Image: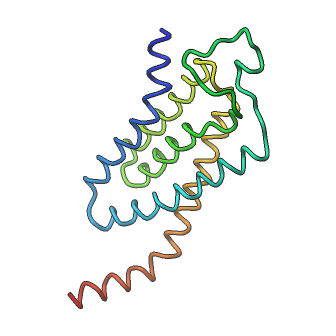
Amino acid sequence: MDTLVVALAQYLPVLVPVAAAVVWFTLPTSAKLSLGFQAVVALVVVMGLIQLAAALHTDPRPFVVDPSVVPLFPHPADNGFPSDHTALASTVGLLVMLYRRRTGLVLLVAGIVGGAARVLAHVHHVEDIVAGVVIAGVTVAVAVAVWNAVRPRLRGRLAALATAG
């Protein structure tokens, strides 16, 4: 069971973006542009929100709080709040949901399962995972809002480029 927990904790957060890349390749060109733009914005926002949350709240990892708890894989004894793995994987899942609802939902669930596995592996508390998912929701809302603000101006420029070429 420990091997499964470790595999889920360490590999699911990596597999989510890989699956999202496969989805991106299957999208029509306009959706590729949209998702790509939103992904870049989301990456900047999620990293900023992770740093802000960590600066505002400290949550020592379970093995730091209770030295009798042994993590299932080596991990630094740094601040566990929020779970950056969960925030990043959940952000990707939510972004993909905008274009492929079922696939995005599967990726979101995978990100949350990866976070839960990190709790079972004793490297995070539940609040770290919940914070990661909340940060992902805020991140995607910001990315969508930025895209909606930029898209009309960008559409005109792209149309002008297409007619000039």
- Residue name at image x 72 percent, y 46 percent: 53
Q: Image height check: is 165 above or below 63?
A: below
Give percent across and percent down for residue 62.
Answer: 71, 21
Q: How is the protein colored in the picture? A: rainbow
Which residue in the rendered view is the most extreme toward the left?
Answer: 165
- Residue name at image x 49 percent, y 17 percent: 5
- Residue name at image x 34 percent, y 41 percent: 19
Corner quadrant of residue 163:
bottom left
Give percent across and percent down for residue 45.
Answer: 59, 57
Q: Nearer the viewer, residue 12 or 105?
A: 12
- 65 left or right, relative to 132: right
Give percent across and percent down for residue 11.
Answer: 43, 29
Give percent across and percent down for residue 98.
Answer: 43, 54
Corner quadrant of residue 99:
bottom left
Q: Image height check: is 107 above or below 21?
A: above
- 137 left or right, relative to 155: right
Q: Image height check: is 147 above or below 26?
A: below
Q: Nearer the viewer, residue 97 or 8?
A: 8
